[in-house]
Image (spheres, helix red, strand yellow):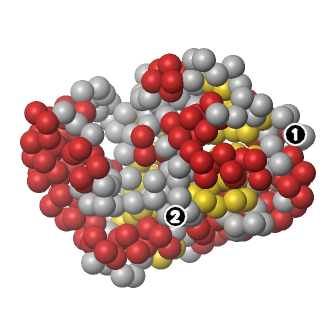
Amino acid sequence: MLKVEVLHDYFAIKGGGEKLVLSLAEHLNVPVTGGFIKAGMSFDGSNINSLKAFQGFFPLQFLSLIKRWQAYQTVADTVIFSGVYAPLAAKSSAKNILYCHTPPRFIYDKKDYFLASLPVWQRPILQALIHYFQPLYEQAFAEMDVIIANSEHIKRRIAKHLNYHDAKVIYPPCDVSGFNWQGQGGYYLSTARLDSLKRVELIIKAFMQMPNKKLIVASGGDEYEKMRQLAQSASNIHFTNWIDETRLKELVANCIATIYIPIDEDFGISPVESMAAGKPVIGVAEGGLLETIVNGETGILINDVDVESLIEAVEEMTTQMALDMRFVCEQRAALFNREIFLEKILAYL
């Protein structure tokens, strides 16, 4: 009997990548292994093994993850890798399948962004880590028998940075049946992680200028306190921090629309979940969102991401307009359901 194993970098958030590997492992009835599970994170009912890599100060965490994955010995016939560190465990004795959410952005397309975000004295440290890690990653990438990209956008990114043009595209699975329309609760919803790449700060600034519009920010992240301080004078903006899946689905089910404007997103599962609940998305016309949202039919895609454009889009996305888009949203989301994902990925096993 074929023995399959699923390996994922680490479990620090309940993001799209984490949902994907847990869904896959559950369907295959196999364990999933991560570099670590962040303290306080709960993944109910999931069978996750942890390599107990160091958590905390980034350079030490970075090096610990590399060493733990390099030392990991699989006994599986087929290994499905998810992330950028886990592929370092690739062994030539197994069939190696990489589900690529993106090549590591701190090495390739967002290197300058990450360097600029650090104090000047820390930049040489990151440069050194990149110099050390890039050949390891590219060697691991070359060990893969099958490369699967999570979108056409990522397939192009792989081709550009790794000169590999044969990646297969399989969209991530969405729990379509788990997200349902319940009503319109008079608020707009942001579920993006609170870090600068997600541009939630612009959403908050837009709603600070629309005191008659309510925003719920249903997420946490490194900038949580910074965002709360920014909006402390705005009674129309409410923060929940990270919440459980049941509460999240309830908020999506009752919002007017969701707002999701990350920088060059790889794919973005949140807009699909929104559409599955019959809720249109105010999004950005770049990255993976161009493959999921149909402008004018399942949401509004803005080209110039600034406060003024967001205000204009929110004003345009009335409760009636959102309601009119409901059924088209649900139909669109069905194209990204879990069954289609599983059927396509199992063909490579």
Q: Amino acid at mark 2?
A: Glu
SS assignment at label 1: loop
**With 130 as the anchor, is 204 left or right in this view?**
right
> Which residue was labeled with disc 1?
184
Q: Amino acid at mark 1?
A: Gln
Which circle's residue, 1 or 2, is located before the other in the chain? 1
Q: Nearer the viewer, residue 50 or 106?
A: 106
Question: What percent of the width, then of the height, locates residue 329?
Answer: 79, 60
Residue depicted at 34% across the width and 39% down the height = 35
> Which residue was labeled with disc 2?
286
Relative to 98, residue 54 above or below: above
Question: What percent of the width, then of the height, locates residue 59?
Answer: 19, 35
Q: Count residues near mark 2 (Cα–Cα under 10 Å), then give few for <14, some for 14-19, many for 20+.
A: some
Quarter holding residue 218: top right
Q: Count residues near mark 1 (Cα–Cα under 10 Å), then give few for <14, some for 14-19, many for 20+.
A: some
Relative to 32, residue 104 above or below: below
Residue depicted at 78% across the width and 66% down the height = 297
Residue depicted at 29% across the width and 49% down the height = 113
Residue depicted at 49% across the width and 43% down the height = 199
Q: Nearer the viewer, residue 324 or 155?
A: 324
